[in-house]
Image: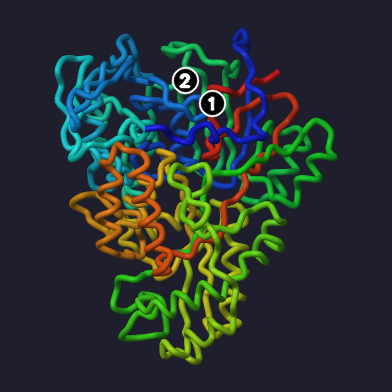
Amino acid sequence: MKLRTGLLAAVAAAAIAVAAPVQAKEFKFAFQGDLSSLDPHSLNESFLLGTLGNIYEGLVLYDENMQVIPGLAESWKTVNPTTWEFKLRKGVKFHGGQDFTADDVIFTWQRAGSKGSDQKTRAGKIKNITKVDDYTILVETPAPNPILVRDLNFLYIMDKEWSEANGTTNATSATGDDKGNFANLNANGTGPFMVKSNQADVKTVMVRNENYWKDIPSNVTQIDFTPIKEAATRVAALVSGELDLVYPVPVQDWQRLEESDGVKPLAGPEARTIFFGMDQSRDELLYSNIKGKNPFKDIKVRQAMAHALNLDAIKQKVMRNAATPAGLMVAPQINGFNEALNLPYPYDPEKAKALLAEAGYPDGFEVTIDCPNNRYVNDEKICQAAASMWAKVGVKVNVLAQPKSKYFGKVLETGGYDTSFYLLGWTPGTMDSENVLSSLIACQNKETKRGLFNLGNYCNPKIDELSAAVGSETDQDKRNAMISEAFDILKNEYGYLPIHQQPLSWGVSDRVTVNQRADNVLDYRYVVVK
């Protein structure tokens, strides 16, 4: 299978420095939200997984261009269409000194499927793992899976011995009801950096793992991460020299960084799509003034919500022309992107009013939307702008904006899908549309682990069928034809309301060079301080 990985590196990425002698170098950066946990199976979120990917590792890694390279597995091959043999890397030790072996891989797979885990979908891609010897395993899949290896990049391996000794054999739930879980507060991976200290909402300090099994370009010996919610404070700290990198940077501040000494904006197209989702499952919405029925089950209401949105206005006024309005649930960097389907729903408020009247809501209705306020670029502002547009057609949308830790704990499967309407962003970790189909669009199915991020449970059996077929089809042309068919059905049913692909928007000091990945992950392996 040939993926579109050649397009994955952000065009504005800074040059990657060559290997340099390791000297004591500190790197300080800020993001708009905190790490919600140190548990690698707690939350399937890009920032958390991207950060923990410097501490924990999968069987494979992404290089600076997001090409798959060997990680904790040295090699792999298919034994038959549903069985893979992985040869594990010998001599690797966890930060605590324990040897990495096949037992850790099997334990990790089982833990990723445990109650509280937000990695159930990835774990569900594997039917069984058999230990051949300490450094050889056989991985069995329910069906042929041409993208299994890419999914393993974010399935981070934990130490079985350490986990059992510390009573953390189950994942930490993102709902926050088991914050005392040992892995939530402590880490023991095999990665190039180790957690030295972690003070929630204040600072996390990581130091270099001098026993790391692989040479890396970075010369950094200590990394200080500080969550700073206010964008103006983040940018000011960068300009003043207190920090070496901040993200995201409000797009309106790009010019300021261009004109300031010693710093610059670092931007590019991100492989993330931002969208609105609606509860289309419950017979009555949890948070609405409509009782006894669910307006979002009516396609005319979903159509009305779509045609009331002026995506060009959001692009111009909220995103300062730095976003790309979308009609698809995947970005151009993702395998399976179909430009012909990416045309947004046209803005037509009069049509929206007529559709609402036809659906039996001539005076509109009221609903609450869940919206993070420190996760995506201008997330709360997008919700507020959209709410004002829906108000013009008669739908009163109350914006419940929350920090991402509370937001995810509320709306995800582990929180019981406690939402009627929400804003979410998604970058498929495999860089393939199958991930979007099986995670966001397939019907919720806890047994097969499919559709677990389909928070509103949009459900179409034909898409389910196509999604499963895409996951096992090895002919790329056939796969992409089925992906397009599934996206076409979704679009015609107004199952989701895509908004845009947001830009990568970092601010960096001239004293550092970094690699800016299209999935917005900061890989410390490529951070070099002058």
The reply to whether the C-beta atoms of the residues labelled 2 and 1 are less than 8 Å apart is no
Query: What numbered label is drawn on residue 240?
Result: none
Instruction: Tell me the residue that label 2 is attached to.
Output: 192
Answer above or below: position of 212 versus 415: above
Answer above or below: position of 404 versus 63: below
Of labels 2 and 1, earlier in sequence is 1
Callout 2: 10 Å neighbours few (<14), some, many (20+)? many
Q: Is residue 528 left or right of residue 80?
A: right
Q: Position of residue 375 (x, y in %)?
A: 54, 51
Q: Position of residue 450 (x, y in %)?
A: 27, 51
Instruction: Tell me the residue that label 1 is attached to.
Output: 64
Quarter in which the C terminus is drawn: top right
Question: Is residue 295 visible from the viewing direction of this image?
Answer: yes
Q: Is residue 158 left or right of residue 34?
A: left
Report the residue at 67% width, 40% height from top.
Answer: 267
Image label count: 2
**Dot 1 lies on which element?**
loop
Report the residue at 77% width, 33% height from top.
Answer: 263
Q: Position of residue 197 (x, y in %)?
A: 49, 30
Callout 1: 10 Å neighbours few (<14), some, many (20+)? some
Answer above or below: position of 479 versus 422: above
Q: Position of residue 421 (x, y in %)?
A: 44, 69
Type of the residue with mark 1: Glu
Residue 463 falls in image quadrant: bottom left
Report the residue at 20% width, 50% height from top.
Answer: 448
